[in-house]
Image (cartoon, rainbow, N blue to C red):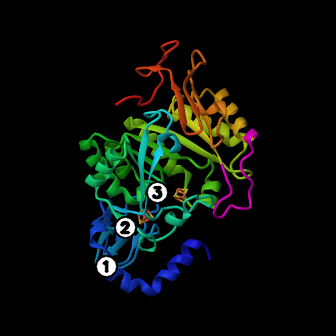
């Protein structure tokens, strides 16, 4: 029995008491679903399209059918909140050196075997302690903590989409930006609404084969590619992360296919981060990614013509910094999550005036 089934089985005996105790403050009607006969509903938030009977929940455990109306149970139900450098997300072409007020609610619509946050992503909202932080308070907290953005992160923001949309709006009114850190397993309409309200999206690409998505992520590759293309089309700032897992998604062919797809569909200026894997959750049997595998991935993608290929989770590596693709000088110098120097003049390389895409000011 995997962890998700185990915790769901544990939760069953207390279902009635839990439903009665559910805090109404956290419950809002879901925005992306269809009503069906016999009080069923079909969720239209992610490609899983769960069809749910009355009093049941979808796969993510964060949404519940009550009498034929579908509800999010995680609106403003914050189970993790930290001030993080934006470089930790990672977003490298977005207000470098700034801090992001980072929040999560419980639940996820996939189950990655390498998940570092499985203790909040693979459980139900009532199984973790949470704090009520409505959108205006979240925006105010963000400012009070000296952060320039709210980051929706750690678990999967798609499953707390209503809270993200409302908070991004409150943030905008208060002068703070919003960034979404997601696996990109989302349907087009909610994604379009997210793109209109937030300032940047980082997609964890995970792998470049359906087999890997099926066996390691319990999701699908195609909808993630569609999501990336939609984000690009709508012009929301986007960066891509690929966690390199030894023996599972580290072949030259996958790196090359990824680079070619990004170059063709998104363009060569979209930053791509190859991130080092550390043994975690259901993949404790594997070693950390060897540095040569990350450098090989970068070399392949550089050769394919991508302009901004980074290596992550290797503090001090030169590929943590942003290099101008024209004059080959460092324009943003990083060491770990620290920004040591920025050599940009209004988004252009200080040395040769080449435009470097990103959100550098504001
Ligand atoms: S968001 Fe949750 S309930 Fe909706 S389709 Fe995805 S997993 Fe199912
Ligand atoms: S999408 Fe993110 S939060 Fe969800 S299981 Fe995968 S790594 Fe964990």
Question: Dividing the picture into quarters, in which one does residue 293 lie?
Answer: top right
The question of residue 281 being in magenta is answered with yes
- Asked if residue 343 is positioned above or below residue 170 in the image, the reply reads above
Closer to the N terminus: mark 3 or mark 1?
1
Of tags 3 and 2, the one toward the viewer is 3
Residue 212 % position (x, y)? 64, 55
* 88 relative position to 138: left or right: right
Numbered badge on residue 42: 2
Residue in view at x 44 percent, y 30 percent = 358
Is 84 or 63 nearer to us in this picture? 84
CB of mark 1 near ligand 1 (< 8 Å): no
Q: How crowded is mark 1: few (under 14 residues within 10 Å), some or many (20 or more)?
A: few
Are discs 3 and 1 less than 8 Å apart at CB? Answer: no
Residue 80 location in percent, x, y? 44, 59
Lateral position of residue 198 relative to residue 242, left or right: left
Cα distance in 3D space between marks 3 and 2: 20 Å
Span highlighted in magenta in the image: 277-292
* Residue that appears at 37% across and 86% down: 16
- Badge 3 density bin: few <14, some 14–19, many ≥20, Cα 10 Å: many
Residue nearest the observer in this picture, 190 or 174: 174
**Residue 181 position (above or below residue 263):** below
Q: Is residue 81 above or below residue 354?
A: below
- For the residues labelled 3 and 1, the Cα–Cα distance comes to 30 Å
Residue position for label 1: 38
300 left or right of 168 in image: right
Q: Does the residue labelled 3 lie within 8 Å of ligand 2?
A: yes
What whole-number distance in Å separates the C-alpha atoms at marks 2 and 1? Answer: 12 Å
């Amino acid at each position: 029995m995997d962890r998700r089934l185990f915790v769901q089985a544990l939760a069953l005996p207390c279902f009635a008491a839990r439903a009665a105790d559910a805090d109404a403050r956290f419950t809002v009607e879901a925005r992306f679903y269809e009503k069906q006969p016999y009080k069923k509903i079909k969720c239209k938030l992610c490609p899983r399209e769960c069809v749910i009977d009355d009093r049941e929940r979808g796969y993510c455990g964060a949404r519940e059918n009550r009498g034929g109306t579908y509800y999010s149970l995680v609106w403003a139900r914050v189970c993790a909140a930290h001030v993080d450098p934006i470089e930790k997300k990672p977003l490298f072409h977005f207000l470098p050196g700034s801090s992001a007020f980072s929040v999560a609610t419980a639940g996820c619509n996939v189950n990655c075997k390498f998940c570092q946050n499985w203790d909040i992503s693979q459980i139900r909202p009532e199984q973790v302690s949470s704090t009520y932080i409505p959108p205006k308070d979240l925006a105010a907290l963000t400012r009070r903590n000296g952060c320039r953005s709210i980051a929706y992160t750690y678990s999967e923001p798609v499953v707390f989409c209503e809270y993200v949309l409302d908070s991004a709006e409150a943030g905008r009114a208060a002068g703070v930006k919003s960034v979404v850190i997601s696996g990109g397993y989302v349907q087009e309409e909610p994604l379009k609404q997210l793109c209109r309200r937030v300032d940047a999206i980082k997609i964890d690409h995970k792998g470049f084969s359906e087999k890997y998505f099926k066996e390691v992520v319990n999701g699908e590759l195609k909808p993630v590619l569609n999501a990336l293309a939609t984000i690009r089309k709508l012009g929301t700032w986007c960066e891509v992360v690929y966690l390199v897992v030894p023996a599972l998604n580290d072949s030259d062919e996958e790196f090359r296919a990824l680079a070619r797809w990004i170059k063709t569909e998104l363009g060569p200026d979209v930053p791509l981060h190859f991130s080092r894997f550390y043994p975690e959750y259901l993949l404790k049997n594997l070693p950390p990614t060897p540095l040569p595998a990350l450098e090989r991935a970068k070399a392949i993608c550089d050769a394919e013509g991508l302009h901004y290929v980074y290596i992550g989770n290797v503090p001090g590596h030169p590929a943590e910094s942003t290099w101008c693709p024209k004059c080959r000088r460092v324009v943003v110098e990083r060491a770990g999550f620290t920004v040591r120097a920025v050599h940009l003049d209004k988004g252009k390389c200080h040395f040769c005036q080449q435009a470097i895409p990103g959100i550098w000011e504001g």
